[in-house]
Amino acid sequence: MRHLLKTSLLMLGLIAHADLTLAAAGKVEFVHGVANIMDSSGGLREAAKGAEFDAGETLLTADGRMQVKFIDGGYISLQPNTSFKVEAYHYSGREDGSERGIFRLIKGGLRAITGVIGHANKPNYRMDTPVATIGIRGTEFTASLDDAQKLLVKVGDGAVFMENHAGNLVLYKGQAGEVSNMTSRPSYSEIMPVLVAAGPQQGTLQDTLEEKQTTDTSENGFRNADIRSDFGAPCVLVACDVLSELEDTVDNTPTVPSPLPGGGGDAISSQILTANARNMTGTWSGTSDVSGRFFGIPVTLAATGTLRVDFSNYQAGFSVNLRDWTTLVSLNTQKEAVGQLQSDGSFTFSDGRMSGSGCTFDCTLKVHWGQLSGDDLGKAGVNFSVRDLLNLIVVNNQTLNLDGRLMGAP
């Protein structure tokens, strides 16, 4: 009896494995607007909810949007006017080295959350574009390719590398990169991929409710159906047209001076190397008024910032608290922005998180640049932005000048 049960379980496992091996690469989770699937011979069929697709087929959106799920658990959300081809795909149900996902972004924009493929064997997941190849070292990224063939990539979680014949670049959480053409080297960018929202055009209320339920409960999926305002904020509590009006008042281009104030030079580098050799730390702080907008209305906020640096490993952390005189806005850093100190005294930072009155949910703390300067590295400058999920509170490209000193090893 035990032998019969063991044999039956083995047969069931083999059947399940065979079913997954023969399964399509993925299926459409939901669609808004016009979207199609093009097979390898050029034939088109409607990309309806539940429609399956396989390797060799291309997903096309016109004025619509489409979210798809792959059988390894990965997700791709396609923006309007996007062409995305599944070049090669194989997943047998286990991570045995044979899994493979090779994709091509022909044009347009997307958000991706990777599944099992590439989790352990990084080279097995690749996304090609006309100007560079995108490889993964993490789980979430956005990418856009415009008509001029300029590629923009931003990492939401983990890391991504961009590579072409001119060179390569690794991006970490919160960082963005760009490639202008096939002959240009991948470089860091302050410009983020533009993911333009498109409202429902061919969906019923029931479709929308089912879609929201699907995306809210899908593990590692995109929440709230990925319907966003022109800037990218989810249209959950506030209508997209209202958000777009608020966003129109925001200057979204970070100001990064070149060279950074007080940065560079042999004197700065020498002081940093000395502090590293002595395992020193440092703290810089300061308070200043900064400008912002609350529900589109200009406000002046008192900002108190703190920069901490551990020279032994070149790691840094920045936090800031914001208050207005009415206390309608009172924000505290919950997760500081983590940075890496460079030899010239500049920093690169990942995003932090803030919360408090004035934030719809959590606010994002983004540090655009930081710089140590002065005798004995006694000065620091940090340029930052704060924005909540719906852009109802916006502090854009404000600079704090901080004072501090170095301390010996703890």
Image (cartoon, rainbow, N blue to C red):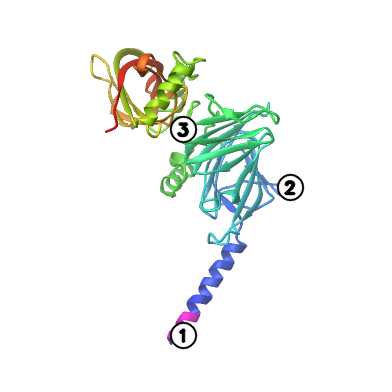
CA distance for labels 2 and 1: 50 Å
Asked whether 363 or 333 is in front, the reply is: 333
Asked whether 151 or 20 is in front, the reply is: 151
CA distance for labels 1 and 3: 54 Å
Left or right of residue 92, residue 205 in this image: left
Asked whether 330 or 235 is in front, the reply is: 330
Q: Is residue 294 above or below residue 225?
A: above
Main SS of the magenta segment? helix
Q: Give how far across and how far down residue 128 sits, in percent.
A: 65, 41
First in sequence: mark 1 or mark 3?
1
CA distance for labels 3 and 2: 39 Å
Q: Give how far across and how far down residue 299 sits, in percent.
A: 33, 13
Q: Give how far across and how far down residue 202 sits, in percent.
A: 56, 38
Q: Nearer the viewer, mark 2 or mark 1?
A: 1
Q: Residue at x 29, y 28 (%)?
A: 408
Q: Nearer the viewer, mark 3 or mark 2?
A: 3
Q: Give how far across and how far down residue 386 sits, in percent.
A: 38, 23
Q: Is residue 369 visible?
A: no
First in sequence: mark 2 or mark 1?
1
Q: Count neighbours of disc 2 (C-alpha within 10 A) and say few if under 14, some if 14 to 19, many if 20 or more.
A: few
Badge 1 amino acid: His
* Secondary-structure class at tag 1: helix
Badge 3 amino acid: Gly
* Secondary-structure class at tag 3: loop
Q: Residue at x 53, y 59 (%)?
A: 95
- What segment carries the magenta color? 2-7
Please name the residue that numbered disc 1 is placed on.
3
First in sequence: mark 3 or mark 2?
2
Please name the residue that numbered disc 3 is placed on.
174
Q: Nearer the viewer, mark 1 or mark 3?
A: 3
Please name the residue that numbered disc 2 is placed on.
43
Badge 2 amino acid: Gly
